[in-house]
Image (cartoon, rainbow, N blue to C red):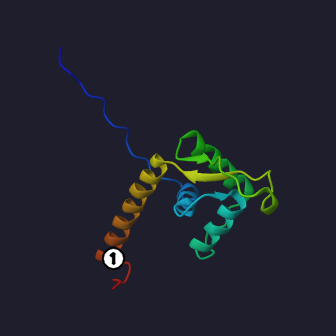
Protein backbone atom coordinates (compact mmCIF):
# COMPACT_ATOMS: atom_id res chain seq x y z
CA UNK A 1 0.00 0.00 0.00
CA UNK A 2 1.43 3.37 -1.02
CA UNK A 3 1.84 6.02 1.65
CA UNK A 4 0.10 9.27 0.79
CA UNK A 5 0.69 12.44 2.67
CA UNK A 6 -2.02 14.97 3.25
CA UNK A 7 -1.60 18.08 1.17
CA UNK A 8 -1.33 21.29 3.14
CA UNK A 9 -4.36 23.51 2.74
CA UNK A 10 -4.11 26.07 -0.04
CA UNK A 11 -3.38 29.52 1.29
CA UNK A 12 -6.24 31.95 0.85
CA UNK A 13 -5.44 35.67 0.94
CA UNK A 14 -6.88 37.53 3.90
CA UNK A 15 -9.67 40.02 3.45
CA UNK A 16 -8.54 43.63 3.86
CA UNK A 17 -10.43 43.85 7.18
CA UNK A 18 -8.81 40.67 8.53
CA UNK A 19 -5.34 41.79 7.42
CA UNK A 20 -5.71 45.20 9.07
CA UNK A 21 -7.03 43.70 12.30
CA UNK A 22 -4.16 41.21 12.51
CA UNK A 23 -1.67 43.97 11.72
CA UNK A 24 -3.18 46.19 14.43
CA UNK A 25 -2.63 43.39 16.97
CA UNK A 26 0.98 42.70 15.93
CA UNK A 27 2.36 45.01 18.61
CA UNK A 28 0.09 43.89 21.44
CA UNK A 29 -3.43 43.21 22.60
CA UNK A 30 -6.22 45.72 22.09
CA UNK A 31 -9.95 45.99 22.62
CA UNK A 32 -12.35 46.40 19.70
CA UNK A 33 -12.53 50.19 19.67
CA UNK A 34 -8.72 50.46 19.91
CA UNK A 35 -8.41 48.06 16.97
CA UNK A 36 -10.81 50.25 14.99
CA UNK A 37 -8.72 53.35 15.76
CA UNK A 38 -5.41 51.61 15.02
CA UNK A 39 -6.65 50.38 11.63
CA UNK A 40 -7.55 53.93 10.69
CA UNK A 41 -4.07 55.14 11.73
CA UNK A 42 -2.05 52.40 9.98
CA UNK A 43 -4.11 52.77 6.80
CA UNK A 44 -3.62 56.55 6.84
CA UNK A 45 -7.38 56.98 7.04
CA UNK A 46 -8.08 54.85 3.97
CA UNK A 47 -9.69 51.98 5.92
CA UNK A 48 -12.42 52.65 8.45
CA UNK A 49 -14.02 49.60 9.99
CA UNK A 50 -17.57 50.00 11.20
CA UNK A 51 -18.77 47.91 14.15
CA UNK A 52 -20.48 45.30 11.94
CA UNK A 53 -17.39 44.57 9.83
CA UNK A 54 -15.05 44.84 12.82
CA UNK A 55 -16.88 42.45 15.13
CA UNK A 56 -17.93 40.07 12.34
CA UNK A 57 -14.31 39.79 11.25
CA UNK A 58 -13.09 39.42 14.84
CA UNK A 59 -15.59 36.58 15.31
CA UNK A 60 -14.25 34.77 12.22
CA UNK A 61 -10.62 35.36 13.27
CA UNK A 62 -11.38 33.85 16.69
CA UNK A 63 -13.19 30.88 15.09
CA UNK A 64 -10.18 30.31 12.81
CA UNK A 65 -7.84 30.60 15.84
CA UNK A 66 -5.89 33.50 14.36
CA UNK A 67 -6.69 35.69 17.36
CA UNK A 68 -7.98 34.92 20.82
CA UNK A 69 -9.66 36.79 23.58
CA UNK A 70 -7.07 37.81 26.13
CA UNK A 71 -7.50 36.68 29.70
CA UNK A 72 -5.45 39.59 31.03
CA UNK A 73 -7.45 42.62 32.07
CA UNK A 74 -6.36 46.15 32.92
CA UNK A 75 -7.01 47.54 36.36
CA UNK A 76 -10.83 47.75 36.69
CA UNK A 77 -10.52 51.36 37.84
CA UNK A 78 -8.80 52.17 34.53
CA UNK A 79 -11.07 50.19 32.20
CA UNK A 80 -14.63 49.27 31.31
CA UNK A 81 -15.22 45.62 32.27
CA UNK A 82 -17.47 45.11 29.22
CA UNK A 83 -14.50 45.46 26.88
CA UNK A 84 -13.01 42.36 25.36
CA UNK A 85 -9.31 42.37 24.58
CA UNK A 86 -7.82 40.38 21.70
CA UNK A 87 -4.32 39.19 20.86
CA UNK A 88 -2.66 37.31 18.00
CA UNK A 89 -2.13 33.57 18.24
CA UNK A 90 0.98 31.91 16.82
CA UNK A 91 -1.14 30.87 13.80
CA UNK A 92 -2.35 34.46 13.42
CA UNK A 93 1.19 35.81 13.48
CA UNK A 94 2.19 33.23 10.85
CA UNK A 95 -0.83 34.07 8.68
CA UNK A 96 0.02 37.78 8.95
CA UNK A 97 3.61 37.07 7.88
CA UNK A 98 2.49 35.00 4.88
CA UNK A 99 0.01 37.67 3.76
CA UNK A 100 2.55 40.47 4.26
CA UNK A 101 5.07 38.54 2.15
CA UNK A 102 2.44 38.02 -0.57
CA UNK A 103 1.65 41.74 -0.60
CA UNK A 104 5.35 42.69 -0.63
CA UNK A 105 5.85 40.44 -3.65
CA UNK A 106 2.96 42.16 -5.43
CA UNK A 107 4.49 45.57 -4.70
CA UNK A 108 7.85 44.36 -6.05
CA UNK A 109 6.12 43.10 -9.20
CA UNK A 110 4.34 46.44 -9.62
CA UNK A 111 7.65 48.27 -9.22
CA UNK A 112 9.33 45.99 -11.77
CA UNK A 113 6.59 46.88 -14.23
CA UNK A 114 7.02 50.59 -13.48
CA UNK A 115 3.55 50.86 -11.98
CA UNK A 116 5.15 52.26 -8.84
CA UNK A 117 8.31 54.27 -8.51
CA UNK A 118 11.23 52.41 -6.96
CA UNK A 119 11.74 53.21 -3.29
CA UNK A 120 15.19 53.68 -1.81
At horizontal 39% and vertical 55% (from top left) the residue drawn is: 98
On the picture, is 108 further left or further right than 89?
left
| Vertical position of residue 63 compared to residue 79: above or below | above
Q: Residue 43, relative to residue 10: is it above or below?
A: below
The picture quadrant where one finds residue 76 is bottom right
* Label 1 Cα neighbours within 10 Å, binned few <14 / some 14-19 / many ≥20: some
Q: Is residue 76 left or right of residue 110?
A: right
The quadrant of the image that shows the C terminus is bottom left
As rendered, which of 116 and 83 lies closer to the eye?
A: 83
Q: Residue at x 68, y 68 (%)?
A: 37
Q: Residue furthest top?
A: 1
Image vertical order of residue 16 relative to residue 63, above or below: below
Which quadrant, please, contains the N terminus?
top left
Q: Position of residue 3 (x, y in %)?
A: 20, 21
Instruction: Find residue 69 and report its horizontal and vertical position in percent.
Output: 63, 46
Q: Nearer the viewer, residue 37 or 43?
A: 37
Q: Residue at x 52, y 58 (%)?
A: 19
Q: Which residue is mark 1?
A: 111
Q: How many marks?
A: 1
Residue occupying image coordinates x 67% and y 48%: 56
Q: Position of residue 92 (x, y in %)?
A: 49, 50
Q: Position of residue 32 (x, y in %)?
A: 70, 57
- Tell me the element at label 1: helix
Q: In the depicted view, which residue is nearer to us: 50 or 30?
A: 30
Amino acid sequence: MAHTSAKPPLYQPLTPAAFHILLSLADGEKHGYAIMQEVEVISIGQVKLGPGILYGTIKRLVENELIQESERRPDPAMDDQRRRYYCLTAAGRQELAVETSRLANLVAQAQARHVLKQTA
